[in-house]
Amino acid sequence: MLEVRAIEVAIQSAPVLRGLSLEVGQGKMVGLVGRNGAGKTTTLRTIMGHLPLAGGSVSFDGHALDRLPPHLRAPLGIGYMPEDRGLVPELSVEENILVPLWATGSKRCTDRLDFVYGVLPELKDMRERRALLLSGGQQKLVALARALAVGTKLLLLDEPFEGVAPALSARLAEVIAGLRGGELSVLIAQSDLNHSRNLLDAEIVIERGENLG
């Protein structure tokens, strides 16, 4: 489903990714594991097109992503949950969830919203609350919901459990575990595997922008 081949990425002329490769098969859950600064976030941002490739290739579901502009990647069914959540503070929970669907011109907003509320029913009760009034953990749930709304084939989750209270971490792990067994592929970037080791089909260790081992 997702194939990353020997990618090289530099930020302000400083090499960050140095020939990193990884694969995520259809319906598989893969962990990208490494310490802070290893290049995990850069990898996900590169897949989404937020950073340009200096070398290598990225393909998804038969599409050469490196040849597509960023705004044409989400419509392929890719959902992205950034580490900093990236919510619009003044928008409501439901509006934040719908943002990528609006941006991609989706005709399935109602269906996808129903799906998201089925997976995360607690968000339906707070759907009219503005994002700025939520706790950090609640914002993580909304960011996951937003990724699920558009991510019908692939989810990219950047440190989903980082900085979240234990109860909400457990809830996030429960939701992510519930995604297993279907056709949805998931790539989870994490500093450790405390919350997800039992969820993963495979793990890829990244160190200084390279595959370790």
Image (tube, rainbow, N blue to C red):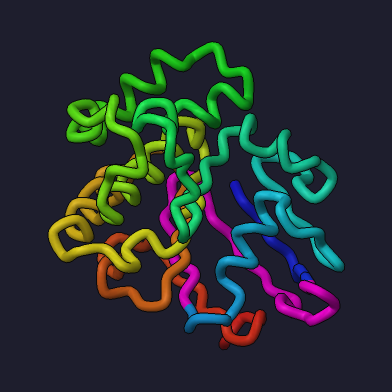
Q: Give coordinates of residue 19: x percent, y percent.
A: 75, 76
Q: Give coordinates of residue 156: x percent, y percent.
A: 51, 52
Q: Quadrant of residue 42?
A: bottom right
In depth, the one of 60 and 143 nearer the eye is 143
Decide: is 180 above or below 205.
above
Q: Give coordinates of residue 140: x percent, y percent.
A: 34, 51
Residue at the image position 67 percent from the left and 45 percent from the top: 60
Which residue sits furthest left?
167
In depth, the one of 25 and 73 nearer the eye is 73
Q: Quadrant of residue 62?
A: top right
Side (left or right) of 180 relative to 87: left
Side (left or right) of 146 relative to 1: left
Magenta: main secondary structure: strand
Residue at the image position 30 percent from the left and 49 percent from the top: 176
Please give the range of residues in magenta: 10-33
Side (left or right) of 164 relative to 3: left
Q: Is residue 31 magenta?
A: yes
Side (left or right) of 40 relative to 62: left
The number of discs equals: 0
Decide: is 114 above or below 73.
above
Residue at the image position 60 percent from the left and 59 percent from the top: 44
Residue at the image position 77 percent from the left and 72 percent from the top: 11
Q: Quadrant of residue 10?
A: bottom right
In depth, the one of 83 and 1 nearer the eye is 83
In depth, the one of 4 and 80 nearer the eye is 80
Q: Is residue 80 magenta?
A: no
